[in-house]
Image (spheres, rainbow, N blue to C red):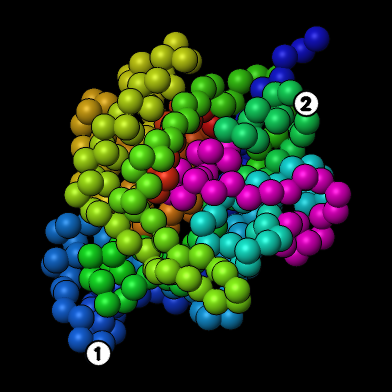
């Protein structure tokens, strides 16, 4: 029997048209009595702009745009898809899943569709699940999407968090193959850190109970992130029998340029081999890795046959890495 693997055959992304530079955001915040500056944001995060979705645009809308671009790049029809996984923390509604809504909007019927909630690690988690399902023969052509509208859960009176995040979506088509694409993955979570990055509110009795806005302990997140990202990347390399020298491109979760620089340094990877979009996208949570991947592919930097390391860390606390050949 031929052994099954999975390979990415197409990438896609979508950013809502409304783009806010730091200057734009600073002006909006100043009108609300919140003081910050372009220099303050850039120095601490590397972010210079982000995109926000309009009020009538849902997470699934962004996901559908990204999915269509990925399908086109892969040369695959929507009806050929037999698995849809959406990584998101900001779905359209409590249920059904964003994946089911995306499925309907794409005109696909019958295949399994579900969401994965691992916050900023969500795409790495979703890709690993899709890979496992393809390897076992449960699916042959999967849409794996990361999509977020984090602007909906930001407290714009808190300058330490509201300047960090943006909206967007990225997607890949993952197909069964007789040659290895995804080489190895390494996933983890530790719920004892649940309080350092969370949205603690909930819906009860038709109203929101508790705080429905994002709260974060920035220094604690930074300290944890750098260490666990290195560990996950090294674990994935070890599982695949590879070393850091085999990595052509590092595509980390785009949270903060300092975290990305520190992780690259620990892995002995030059920043010239790191895909960076945080400056233009901000932190788009589960969408950040597929957005960066698509940007690298469409710019011509990332080429077929190259080895990529994807890694993410997010609330939960969750983290993970996927090593793959494109």
In this picture, which residue range is highlighted in magenta? 100-127
Q: Residue furthest front?
A: 205
5 or 204, which is in the foreground?
A: 204
In the displayed structure, 24 sits above or below 76; it is below
Question: Where is residue 29 shown, x and y percent of the image?
Answer: 26, 82
The structure residue drawn at horizontal position 71% and vertical position 29%, both measured from the top left corner, is 134
How crowded pointer 2 is (Cα within 10 Å; few <14, some 14-19, many 20+) is rated as: few
Q: Residue furthest right?
A: 110
- Say which label, 1 or 2, has the lower sequence index: 1
**Which residue corresponds to mark 2?**
137
Residue 108 located within the stretch drawn in magenta: yes
150 or 53, which is in the foreground?
A: 150
**Residue 45 appears in the figure:** yes
**Residue 270 appears in the figure:** no
Picture quadrant of residue 243: top left
The structure residue drawn at horizontal position 43% and vertical position 35%, both measured from the top left corner, is 189
Distance between the alpha carbons at the discs numbered 1 and 2: 55 Å
**Which residue corresponds to mark 1?**
31
The structure residue drawn at horizontal position 30% and vertical position 51%, both measured from the top left corner, is 196
Picture quadrant of residue 156: bottom left
Q: Look at the numbered discs 1 and 2 and tell me whether their residues touch, using CB distance below 8 Å.
A: no
Residue 93 located within the stretch drawn in magenta: no
For mark 1, give the secondary structure: helix
Question: Where is residue 161 shown, x and y percent of the image?
Answer: 28, 64
Question: Where is residue 2 shown, x and y percent of the image?
Answer: 77, 12
The structure residue drawn at horizontal position 78% and vertical position 26%, both measured from the top left corner, is 137
């Amino acid at each position: 029997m031929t052994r099954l693997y999975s390979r990415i055959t197409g990438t896609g992304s979508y950013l809502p048209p409304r783009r806010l530079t730091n200057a734009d955001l600073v002006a909006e915040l100043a009108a609300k009595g919140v003081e910050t500056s372009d220099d303050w944001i850039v120095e601490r995060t590397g972010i210079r702009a982000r995109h926000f979705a309009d009020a009538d645009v849902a997470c699934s809308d962004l996901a559908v745009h990204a999915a269509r671009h990925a399908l086109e790049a892969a040369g695959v029809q929507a009806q050929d898809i037999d698995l849809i996984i959406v990584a998101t923390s900001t779905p359209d509604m409590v249920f059904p899943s964003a994946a089911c809504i995306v499925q309907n909007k794409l005109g696909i019927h019958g295949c399994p569709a579900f969401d994965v909630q691992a916050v900023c690690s969500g795409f790495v988690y979703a890709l690993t699940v899709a890979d496992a399902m393809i390897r076992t023969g449960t699916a042959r052509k999967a849409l794996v999407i990361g999509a977020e509208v984090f602007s909906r859960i930001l407290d714009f009176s808190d300058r330490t968090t509201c300047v960090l995040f943006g909206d967007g979506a990225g997607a890949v088509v993952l197909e069964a193959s007789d040659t290895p694409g995804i080489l190895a993955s390494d996933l983890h979570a530790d719920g004892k850190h649940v309080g350092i990055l969370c949205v603690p509110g909930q819906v009860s009795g038709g109203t929101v109970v508790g705080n429905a806005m994002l709260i974060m302990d920035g220094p604690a997140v930074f300290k944890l992130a750098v260490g666990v990202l290195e560990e996950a990347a090294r674990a994935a390399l070890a599982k695949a029998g590879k070393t850091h020298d085999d990595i052509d491109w590092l595509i980390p979760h785009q949270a903060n340029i300092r975290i990305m620089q520190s992780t690259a340094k620990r892995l002995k990877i030059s920043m010239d081999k790191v895909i960076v979009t945080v400056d233009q996208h901000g932190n788009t949570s589960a969408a950040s890795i597929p957005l960066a991947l698509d940007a690298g592919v469409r710019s011509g930097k990332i080429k077929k046959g190259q080895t990529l390391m994807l890694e993410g860390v997010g609330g939960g606390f969750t983290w993970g890495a996927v090593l793959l050949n494109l």
